[in-house]
Amino acid sequence: MGKQRREPKFGIPDEENPEWTTEDFRLARPVKQAMPELIEAAKRARGRPRLASPKQHVSLRLDPMVLAGFKAMGPGWQKQINDTLARALARARKQKPVRATRLKRAA
């Protein structure tokens, strides 16, 4: 027993995607019930896992000579700046301990 389909109110009839009947709506189920694997796949994180302490984006003004020198090192020059600053901070901490209150204000 074939379902009777109505002609669409607007546009050209589409045999592959006909208008829904009242019976179609009655039989419809939420996608969560019909395709639970699709919902689970959508929930999974994509891309790289989140870092525990991700780097922060900042705007920093540097002397042209300093910037040109780091860029001349080629790809990864921003990481080189980060590494250089981290080493300088480690040296400064060895020489003179930084008080915790000063670090909190800087953040």
Image: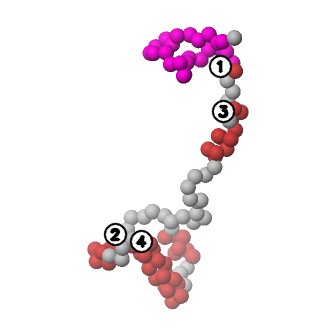
In primary-sequence order, the first of circles 2 and 4 is 2
Label 3: which residue? 31
Q: Residue 21, how many percent across, how many down? A: 62, 14
Q: Quadrant of the image for the N terminus?
A: top right
The secondary element bearing badge 2 is classed as loop
Q: Vertically, is 49 above or below 82? A: above
Q: Which mark is residue 4?
A: none
Q: Earlier in the sequence, mark 4 or mark 3?
A: 3
| Residue in view at x 42 percent, y 71 percent | 76
Please tell me how crowded label 3 is: few (under 14), some (14-19), or many (20+) other residues with Cα within 10 Å: few
* The stretch drawn in magenta includes residue 67: no
- Judge by depth and name the residue closer to the eye, 63 or 18: 18
Local SS, label 4? loop
The mark that comes first in sequence, 1 or 2, is 1
Give the residue type at disc 3.
Val
| Residue for badge 2 | 61
Q: Amino acid at mark 2?
A: Arg
Whole-angstrom CA distance, mark 2 to mark 4, is 18 Å
What's drawn in magenta, residue-wise? 2-26
Magenta part, dominant SS? loop
For label 4, the residue is 76
